[in-house]
Image (cartoon, helix red, strand yellow):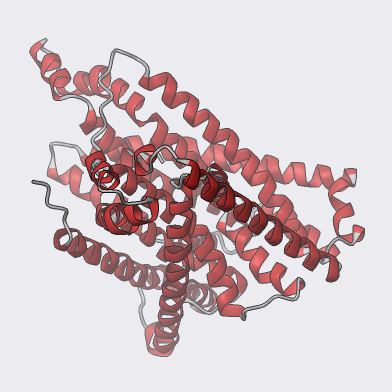
Amino acid sequence: MSSVLFDVPGPKARRRHRILTVLTVLGIVAVVAAVIWRFWTTGQFDPDLWEVFVTPDYMVFIAEGLYYTLLAAVLAIIGALAFGMLFGIGKLSDHAWIRWPCWLIVEFFRAVPLYILITYLWALYRFQIEILAPLVIGLILYNGSVLAETVRAGINAVPRGQVEAAYALGMRKNAVMRIVQLPQAIKIMTPAIISQCIVAMKDTSLGYIVVAPGLTYAGRQIWREFENHLQVALVLGVIYILANSCLELLGRFAQRRLTESRTVDMAIDPADPTLAPR
Amino acid sequence: MDFSFLQDSGELILKGFWVTLRVFLASGLIALVVGTLVAVARVSPVPVMRGVGAAYVTIFRNTPLLLLLFITYYGLPAMNISFGFFWNVSLAAGLYTAAFVCEALRSGINGVPLGQAEAARAIGMPFTMTMTQVVLPQAFRLVVPPMASVFIALAKNTSLVAALGLADLAFRLQGLLRDYPSSRTAAFLTIAFMYIVIVAAISLLAGWAERRWKVVTR
């Protein structure tokens, strides 16, 4: 689409584009230079503030934090997938007494900020520190509710004919869901699930507020000792960006792999934002 | 469930609600302005600008908001730059959300029928005019639903400023949980309800805007 927004540039436009390119590059260079200059004049490049990140003991400490962050993320994703499957299918149930409670729970946890959910769960654990439980349970409830919506939309996106054909073959409701709808829905949902994994990964940083082990906790310990808040935040940011970029690559790979398959008609309803690839 | 804490703390909770609302509005404004600029850069004819837009989105979308808050809250003053406590934290939330606003807008720009941009070009409009007169006005209407979910996410994300000590709703909840151990669930539900009010208001507004500004295709 972006290619139809403008013509193939003529000589004038090419000159203008060159000028814009130079201006953009100059602007970026100016911003970076200003930041570096600020860093320099306020002594943020002081080796004492950075040395900790190449000190073996502290590198192990950060790696340990990364391990707990990844552990929390993996546990949260597995739990959220189970939660999402259960409630997503529950929302599609034929029985109103299953559908309504599922709807209420999913909508509630989707609307409540993760921060206050985790704080509340932490209070239920009597403010114990260095436990993962409040963080992981909070992540499961929130991401699970979002995934429940994804599951519901994914199942609805399976072509109607598939379900009708299955019923025509004499399958029961249970078998139709298990053998026909779910396998195809999972294929459709994979990109959305992976982008939710990135969200969950980022939200593990909230372990900071409940003093749960993880990257941000390790960061807090380091800046308490070295008074280098800015440096810690920058280094942790880079770690998070790298981890999430890996997930994003995986998501793109999965999407290409799955959408190239010829067995399923992958036309996704564009009106349904829950399935739109991010 | 014991809601008696409302008698003593009701006023504090309302004050917290007001702070949450202010952070939301301030960061929402920053997000809208910066996000639109980045979105235009991402579809511009100049490859370098497209690259800058893409880099902005990658960086800000993949960094947890909490870390951005640390950078603006601790980092900016350390570098002798400060816009004041309130604006420092709003800036982080705004820049973070701008990445999502940009992606929502870009999907909207991609959703405007090809013929519109082609027609604009055919009558000789340059890129800037095509964007401002033809594509963006339609794109803004198309993006109402995804934009609403971006702003709902922002409203919930503003709760993170409590981690830095800004006395918003989430901060008040922390106080209530400590002061009234016997009515923890009641306190949680009260604060959750106030967030749900904000979220519901955004949804209603978005629903109204969607109906009001629907692009009628003939």
Residue B91 x/y as whole percent: 55, 69
Q: Quadrant of the N terminus of chain B?
A: bottom left
Task: Name the residue at 46% across, 59% down.
Answer: B37
Residue B95 x/y as whole percent: 53, 62
Q: In the figure, residue A217 lies in which quadrant?
A: bottom right
Q: Which residue occupies the foreground of this view, A68 or A8?
A: A8
Task: Name the residue at 70% across, 61% down.
Answer: A30
Residue B163 x/y as whole percent: 59, 68
Residue ranking furthest to the top:
A169
A1 on left or right of A207: left
**Vertical relation: A71 (above or below) B82:** above
Task: Name the residue at 58% across, 52% down.
Answer: A19
Residue A156 in sight in this render: yes
Q: In the figure, residue A274 lies in which quadrant?
A: top left
A9 on left or right of B209: right
Residue A108 in sight in this render: no
Q: Which residue occupies the foreground of this view, A34 or A77?
A: A34
B18 on left or right of A272: right
Q: In the figure, residue B80 lies in which quadrant?
A: bottom right
Residue B160 x/y as whole percent: 53, 65
Task: Name the residue at 19% across, 37% down.
Answer: A92
**Vertical relation: A171 (above or below) B1:** above
Residue ranking furthest to the front:
A11
